[in-house]
Amino acid sequence: MGELIISFANWIWGTPMLVILMGGGLMLLVHSGFVPFRKIGHAIGLLSGKYDDDLAPGQISSFQALSAAIAATVGLGNISGVAIAINMGGPGAIFWMWVSAFVGMATKFYTCSLAIMYRGKDSEGQIQGGPMYVIEEGMGKKWKFLSIVFCGAGVLGLLAIFQANQLTAVLRTVILEPAGLDEGDKTRWIIGITMMVLVAIVILGGIKRIAAVASKMVPFMVGLYFVTVILIVFKYIGDVPEMLFRILTDAFTGEAMAGGAVGAVIIVGARRAAFSNEAGIGTAPMVHGASKNNEPIREGLIAMLGPFIDTIVVCTLTALVIMLTGVWESTEKDGVRLTLAAFDMALPHFGRYLLMFAVLVFALSTMFTYSYYGHKCFGYLFGAKKADYYNYFYLITIVAGAVASLDVVVSLVDGMYAIMAVPTMISTFYLAPKVRIAMKDYFQRMKKA
């Protein structure tokens, strides 16, 4: 069974997802008239809150929605995902992550505009958003089976097992092993149960508490990580142009790849970018759909900043650190341990502790937000009254993630992500003309205002 799950994930994340996410996103980028390039200034301006309307339906502000969505995306995908990309695809994979990010900005613009345009109500009468409601309200009841597919995959795909596993690995490597305190399985159990209790305190308070905690933690943690990485980049500033040139040349030659196949480099970059910024998977529309906003296009513009912050800014900085220190060529380490080695080399004595703190905050904030996504999927399938049962299931799996060996489980999560992307992208294409009409109307009104 385990082998089957792993081979399914590897197959679906090959050509099928490349066509759906990269090809589909490229079509949306053209269809939108290249909105991510033309309107990024306006999108950044919206974050000031000048247009916020506290009386609009919804539960949280647009800034809180973006913070919660970024909390779920800026995280281990940026720290260990970039390391995996460089390990598997060489520096050229980073270029294809950039391409995926710009394409992903267009996808996020459409999916999150639709999340406001076609909100639904759960069985308790609360206004909700997300692909399952977009499909039901926008495409009609006969398409409801797509909503069920999306939510079924979401209940399993949005567990925090990967985060629990990687966080446990970092805590053991940085603190417990050097101090001689690591006791193998017993230590994993203790870390797992501690994480479960911390996450329980936040998630049992619902989306408002999750959003309040995320909107305080996320700007702080991105800021701290940013400052640390900039310090390292400045230390090696003379080598930066050479590294950027290397990313560009490797993208088209695949020289750093075993076998040197450009197609393989593109697949590695696209897969890691999709995992990192989640554009097209359908998670962000669930949280943006809960924001207090009556302007679908405005929410879409704010949401499209997610892949930019996540992939263009944070992933690039991580990639530069790994490349400037040269650890990717001289070590066998992978994932988060490769990034640890780079921080260790660039900032001896304290670099690994700064990274550990960043990983701790990133992983916990992701765990908070994922619980909300899974809770919504469960509520859609079984009724809002029963949705709280999901939280208890979710908390138990955090301990399982800390203790288990995760090859199979990570492939399960990967596979479920891919299944979620199919209904999300079908509904986005089906309803894209409606977004375009609303977009023209919105920008005409903005000119007059």
Image: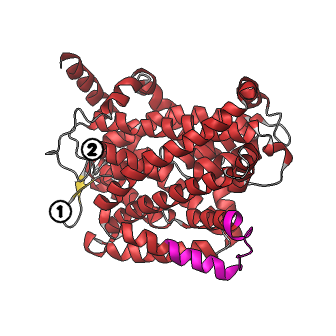
Query: Residue 152's x, y, as percent?
Result: 44, 65
Q: Is residue 332 left or right of residue 30?
A: right
How many numbered marks appear? 2
Q: Residue 266: tell me if it is visible.
A: no
Q: Residue at x 56, y 45 (%)?
A: 225
Segment tinted magenta in the rendering: 173-195
Near-viewer residue (368 or 294): 368
Near-viewer residue (341 or 104): 341
From the image, tell me which residue sits under label 1. Answer: 125
Most common SS among magenta residues: helix
Q: Residue at x 79, y 45 (%)?
A: 327
Q: Residues within 10 Å of mark 1 (few under 14, many from 20)?
A: few
Query: Residue 18's x, y, as percent?
Result: 60, 42
Near-viewer residue (339 or 114): 339
- Amino acid on which disc 1 is placed: Gly
- Amino acid on which disc 2 is placed: Ile
State whether residue 155 is above or below residue 103. below
Q: Residue at x 86, y 46 (%)?
A: 330
